[in-house]
Image (tube, rainbow, N blue to C red):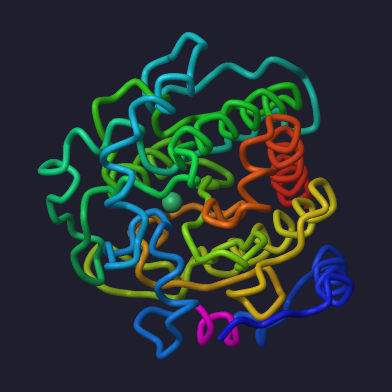
Amino acid sequence: MTRRLAAGAAALFLAACLAGCSDGGAQDRAQGAGGKGGPAPAAGASSAGAADRTPQPRSDQGQEASQAPSAAASASASPVPPAGAADAPAGDGPLKGKVVVVDPGHNSRNNEHTAEINRQVDIGTGHKECDTTGTETNSGYTEAAFSLDVAHRLRSILRERGATVVLTHDGDRPFGPCVTERADIGNKAHGDAAVSIHADGAGPGQRGFHVILPASVHGGAADTSAITGPSKELGARVAGKFLESTGSAPSNYIGEGTGLDTRGDLGGLNLSTIPKVFIECGNMRDAQDAAQLTDETWREKAAQGIANGITDFLRG
Ligand SMILES: [Zn+2]
C-alpha cells in the first residue's frame, strides 16, 4: 500500500493549493488511503500514533510506556504558564488580534496514568480513550517531547507576529488533557485557527509529513460542518509552507503524495468549532525521518513552516 509520488509533483500540488486550494479529489483520495478500518495495513495501522486513534497492536504506544520519562524531562525547561492560558502577544505584527491554539500532542507522563488516559470519553460520533501515549523514535525520543518542543517554537514565532497563543497544555499536567478538553480549550478561546502537533509511528521506509483535516461528521456534540471548509484551507497552507520550510516530502504512505489526509475518528477534530488541523511532522520509526525529528535545527524549520501556513491562512 505504500505509494510513492515524485516530490516535485506533490510540490506542484501544494503550490497550487497555496494559490487557493479547492481540491475535493485529494480529500476523497486521502480518506480512502488513511481512512479508519480500511483494508490497507500500512496506511491504516501506521497512523495509530496519531493523537487519539484507538491503540492497535502494532502501535508504538505500548512501547513508549516503559521508556518515556527520560526524554520527557528534557522537553520543557522553560517556565510553564497554566494550561490553556493565553500568552500575551509579544509583537505588533500581522497577526495582531488573532488567537491561535497550539495543541502539543500527547503528554510525556501519560504512560504513568494508563487508567486515566484509557478512560473512554464521548467524541460525539462514538467513544475514544481520553488520550494516548504517542510514539517515539527507536532511541527513545518521545512524540510528546517532540510535539511540546515544536509547540514552544511555534508559539514564539506566532507571538512575534502579534498573535495571542493558547497552548492546550505545557507539560504541566500529570496526564492529558483528554482529547475532548483539547478541543474545548480551543473552542472556549475562540481561536481563529488551531493546530495539533504530532509525529507518526509507522514502519521503516514510510516517510514524510501529512496534515490531517476534519471530515464532515455530525453526531452528539460533534458537528464539523462549519469548519471543514476553513480547516481544509488551513491544512493546505500549513502543508505547503511546511514543505517549503523543511524540504521534507509529503508522506509516501498516506494521502497519495498530497500531504493531506481526512479523518472522522479524531475527537480533537470532531469536537472543534474552530478551524483545526493535525500535522504529523514525520515518522519517528523511520531512521531518516527520526534523524530530522531529533534535530533541533530541523524542528525550528518545522515550526517556521507551520507558523507560515497559519499566517497565510489568517491573513487570507
Ligand atoms: Zn500523535
For the image shown, how many numbered marks are present on the structure? 0
Tell me which secondary structure the magenta stretch mostly adopts.
helix
| 145 to 313, vertically: above or below | above
Residue under the image location 78 percent in, 59 percent down: 240
Q: Nearer the viewer, residue 81 or 66?
A: 66
Residue 29 is covered by the magenta coloring: yes
Q: Is residue 41 left or right of residue 198?
A: left
Q: Is residue 161 left or right of residue 61?
A: right
Q: Is residue 233 left or right of residue 262?
A: right
Q: Nearer the viewer, residue 41 or 19?
A: 41
Q: Nearer the viewer, residue 194 or 8?
A: 8
Q: Residue furthest bottom?
A: 39
Instruction: Give the quadrant of residue 69.
Output: top left
Residue under the image location 75 percent in, 51 percent down: 242
Image quarter hosting the N terminus: bottom right
**Residue 249: image location, x then y, percent:** 76, 63
**Residue 91: image location, x then y, percent:** 75, 17
The stretch of residues the image draws in magenta is 28-34
Instruction: Give the quadrant of residue 256.
Output: bottom right
Residue 81 is covered by the magenta coloring: no
Residue under the image location 52 percent in, 73 percent down: 262
Instruction: Give the quadrant of residue 97.
Output: top right
**Residue 205: image location, x then y, percent:** 62, 67
Q: Residue furthest top?
A: 79
**Residue 85: image location, x then y, percent:** 42, 22
| 270 to 66, vertically: above or below | below
